[in-house]
Amino acid sequence: MLELFKETGAILEGHFLLSSGRHSNKYIQCAKILMYPDKAERVVRKVVEKIKDLDIDVVVGPAMGGIIVAYEIGRQLSRRAIFTEREEGIMKLRRGFEIKKGRGYL
C-alpha cells in the first residue's frame, strides 16, 4: 500500500499542523490517491477486508473528503452509501438521506 501512496504523490513531507493540534513532518493527502479509481479500489479493499463481517447497512462519509471513500466501501460491500454535510457548523444528513433507527452503519 505504501508504494501506491508514493507513486501517486500522496505522501507529503514538510511541516504540518494536524487537526489534532499535533505537528508532523509527513502527511498523507488521500485525495491524491483517490484521483485514480483503480488505486483507490485497492486501498479501500484493505479496509473492507477488515470490516466485511460487521453488520453494516449504510456507509456514511463526510462531504469534506469522505464521499468517495464511503461510496467505494459501500460499492465493495454492496451497501448503500450516503454522506453528511455541514449545516450551521454541525454535520447532518441532508438531501433526503436518512438512516432508519436500529440499523447498523459505518
Image: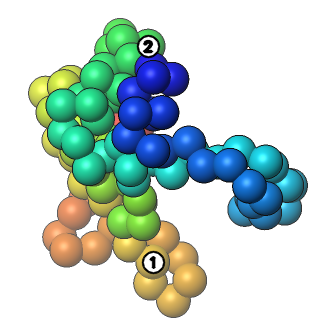
Picture coordinates of residue 12, whole percent (x, y): 60, 49
Quarter that holds the N terminus: top left
Q: In this view, does 56 lie above or below 12?
A: above
| Amino acid type shown at disc 2 | Lys
Give the x, y percent position of residue 51: 41, 18
Q: Which residue is most to the bottom?
A: 88
The quarter of the picture where the C terminus appears is top left
Mark seen at residue 21:
none
Q: Which colour scheme is used?
A: rainbow
Q: Please name whichever residue, 105 or 32, is drawn nearer the observer in this view of the structure.
A: 32
The amino acid beneath tag 1 is Arg
Q: Indicate left or right for 92 with 78 as reference.
A: right
List x then y, in percent, for residue 13.
Answer: 68, 49
Where residue 68 appears, as percent x and y from the top left, is 27, 50
Above or below 87: residue 92: above
Point 45% across, 77% down: residue: 86
SS class, disc 1:
strand
Residue plotted at (28% across, 23% down): 42
Depth check: give the residue in front, 57 or 49: 49
Towards the viewer: 81 or 8: 8
Residue that badge 1 annotates? 86
- Closer to the chain start, of discs 1 and 2, is 2
Q: In the rendered view, would you say 20 is above or below 28?
A: below
Instruction: Report the front residue among 83 and 37.
Output: 37
Q: Residue at x 45, y 44 (%)?
A: 9
Q: Mark 2 points at which residue?
A: 50
Q: Distance between the residues labelled 1 and 2?
A: 29 Å
Query: Which element is circle 2 on?
Result: helix
| CA neighbours of label 2 inside 10 A, class few (<14), some (14 to 19), many (20+) | few
The residue depicted at 17 percent of the width and 70 percent of the height is 96
